[in-house]
Image (cartoon, rainbow, N blue to C red):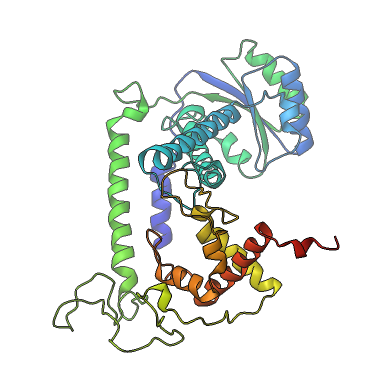
Amino acid sequence: MFGRILNKIDEEFLKSEPRKGELFAVSALFDTPDQIITSAEKVSGSGYRRFDVLTPYPMHGLDNAMRLRETKIGWVGLLAGMSGTTLAFLMIWWMVGIDYKNVIGGKPFFNIAPSIPIMFELTVLLSALTLVAFLIAVFNKLPSNANPLMATEFMKHVTSDKFGIYIEAKDPKFNQNEIKSLFSSLGASEVYDINEVSYDEGKTKNPILDFKFVGNLIGVGIVTAILSYFTLNYLLFLPPFNWMHHQAKVLPQSESKFFNDGFSMRKPVEGTVARGFIPYEFKGMHDSLVVETPNPLPVTKEILEKGKKNFDIYCSPCHGYYGKGDSRLRGQFPVPPTLHSEKVRSWKDANIYHVITNGQNVMPSYEKQISRDDRWAIIHYLRVLQRSQNAPDSDFEGK
């Protein structure tokens, strides 16, 4: 039953149309790859230009045999890629350098290095889309795809078991009898005359603006959107599958039906301590009240490297890489005092830890950004900086 339906469809839609038009081309079929290569060399060498070779699979050497010129599609890709790079550059420059400036560690508002991945992605995207559009609309002249070769014995063979070549009647050197004699001398198994087919081209000169074609595109788009929406939002979530989208949880900033005040985000219970975290006991106090506890971390290479890394990230934007107060924020934030003053050098480690944790003047608290051990590691590294910039004479004795 199903087979009969398919045969009926084939008879209705795949039947050949009558060839009543003028001569389109003379074609020939060959049995071996060597024959088609030799034929392509002979045809191109004889001065024919409007011809083509069709094979059931790609063949090396045909380009040279046909003396094909380099395709222009590469220039399209180059121009599209350069346009994508330029647009990405201008987009990022405008967004982060002009329209919405953000101070991030004293770095320039527009920085070329982190912009390269986005520029690369937009280059590839615009180049690929433009190449596909040009191949469809310009080089292949779609949707006008009515080629006289379709639905011919020649096309059936070159897509399955034979190698074919044809020369169009529009070629300046075209002579029907001479071409048939040429193909026969080259060993062609079959030679065909291919006539034009009378197509209903519609009322529009440009097929891409044809009402039926545009209507079909819109219809296909609507049906695809409806099916995609139904599949992605309903079909995939039919019981028992919910893909963990529905869970007994509360999303941030959402209303709670459980608590009386309606807030889903709850404050920690007063008086409790989170596991692995001990609150800072001198929070909010003046630094003169801080108990002088020693730095709990040993002075090792690993600790100093960790301290340097965190100092460069969190401290250097304002204090500078060497703690001299030479801010890298280019006047966008108040410049702090140097960390090499007598006052700071005479401070105990606990006093510096207190300032990092509690904040001071315009300096905010870094309690949330920097862990406790990393704060102590920063202090070790700061002592190294102070020693390097204020070394006593004893450090130079014997050197």
- Please identify the quarter of the rendering in which residue 286 is found: bottom left
Residue 338: horizontal and vertical position, in percent? 53, 55
Check the image and report above or below for 327 versus 67. below
Q: Nearer the viewer, residue 297 or 243?
A: 297
Q: At 60% from the left edge and 63% from the top edge, which residue is drawn?
A: 309
Q: Is residue 158 left or right of residue 186?
A: left
Nearest the eye: 132 or 373: 373
Seen in the picture, residue 49 relative to 301 is either above or below; the reply is: above
User: From what the image shows, is residue 55 above or below residue 255?
Assistant: above
- Judge left or right: residue 211 versus residue 132: left
Screen quadrant of the C terminus: bottom right
* Residue 257 visible in image: yes
The answer to whether residue 244 is above or below residue 16 is below
At a point 62% along the width and 62% down the height, the residue shown is: 386
Position of residue 56 measured from the top left corner of the image (x, y, whole percent): 65, 42
Give the camera-side residue of 135 and 245.
245
At a point 79% along the width and 60% down the height, the residue shown is 396
Identify the residue at the far top of this view: 172
Task: Report the front residue among 355 and 147.
Answer: 355
Q: Where does the image place residue 88, in percent across and percent down from the top left?
A: 47, 38
Relative side of 146 to 158, left or right = left
Q: Residue furthest right?
A: 398
Say which quarter of the image contains residue 35.
top right
Name the residue rendered at 72%, 23% in the picture: 67
Horizontal side of 272 relative to 49 (left or right) equals left
Quadrant in which the N terminus appears = bottom left
x, y (%) of residue 110?
48, 41
Number of marks drawn: 0
Q: Is residue 150 visible?
A: no
